[in-house]
Image (cartoon, helix red, strand yellow):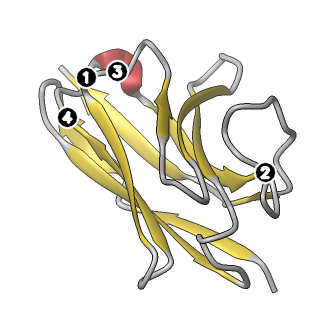
């Protein structure tokens, strides 16, 4: 059974840091890219970052470049999103998802599986 479970969200002051985790089961990261999305209140969901399955290359939205880092530990079947220098506008529910077997980050694939999300709140 495929599952993605996010954790690590919470309340942090502006300028602070959080590390989100996406623990996956039912598949291995060797063959599945993982993408982080976020949805702020009243806004559309947006892609934040992605890590490819085969070579581990990464992509970032312009709004988080230089502040967020995506990484993975294949031995733990977990993907991380290190978020530094957090801003008020980073407040959102963060989700991890996968486009499916051997589908990478570059194409605009629909996501096959989603986690339930973890809330990040940045305060001033």
Q: Quadrant of residue 116?
A: bottom right
Residue found at the very far front of the displayed protein: 55
Q: CA distance from mark 4 to mark 3?
A: 10 Å
Tell me residue 34's x, y (percent): 61, 54
- Residue nearest the observer in this picture, 121 or 74: 74
Judged by depth in the image, the label closer to the viewer, 2 or 4, is 2
Tell me residue 30's x, y (percent): 60, 71
Q: In the rendered view, tell whether residue 32 sits above or below residue 46.
A: below
Q: CA distance from mark 2 to mark 4?
A: 28 Å
Structural crowding at the residue carrying mark 2, measured as other residues with C-alpha within 10 Å and reported as few (<14), some (14–19) or many (≥20) = many
Q: Which of the labelled discs sits on residue 84, or is there none?
A: 4
Judged by depth in the image, the label closer to the viewer, 3 or 2, is 2
Kindly indicate whether the residue at mark 2 contacts the one at mark 1 (C-beta within 8 angstroms): no
As helix, strand or loop, the secondary structure at mark 3 comes to: loop
As helix, strand or loop, the secondary structure at mark 4 comes to: loop
Q: Residue at left 77%, top 78%?
A: 2
Please give the residue where the numbered disc 3 appears in the rendered image.
65
Kindly indicate whether the residue at mark 1 contacts the one at mark 3 (C-beta within 8 angstroms): yes
Q: Quadrant of the N terminus?
A: bottom right
Please give the residue where the numbered disc 1 appears in the rendered image.
66
Q: In the rendered view, tell whether residue 51 sits above or below residue 101.
A: above
Q: Quadrant of residue 27?
A: bottom right
Q: CA distance from mark 4 to mark 1?
A: 9 Å
Q: Residue at left 50%, top 32%?
A: 59
Please give the residue where the numbered disc 2 appears in the rendered image.
103
């Amino acid at each position: 059974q495929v599952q993605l479970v996010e954790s690590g969200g919470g309340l942090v002051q502006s300028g602070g840091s959080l590390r989100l985790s996406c623990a996956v089961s039912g598949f291995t990261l060797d063959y599945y890219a993982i993408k982080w999305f976020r949805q702020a209140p009243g806004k559309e969901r947006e892609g934040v970052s992605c890590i490819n399955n085969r070579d581990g290359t990464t992509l970032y939205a312009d709004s988080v470049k230089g502040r967020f880092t995506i990484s993975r530990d294949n031995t733990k079947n977990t993907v991380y999103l290190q978020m530094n220098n957090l801003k008020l506008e980073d407040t959102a529910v963060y989700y991890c998802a996968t486009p499916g077997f051997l589908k990478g980050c570059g194409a605009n694939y629909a996501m096959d599986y989603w986690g339930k999300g973890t809330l990040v709140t940045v305060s001033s």
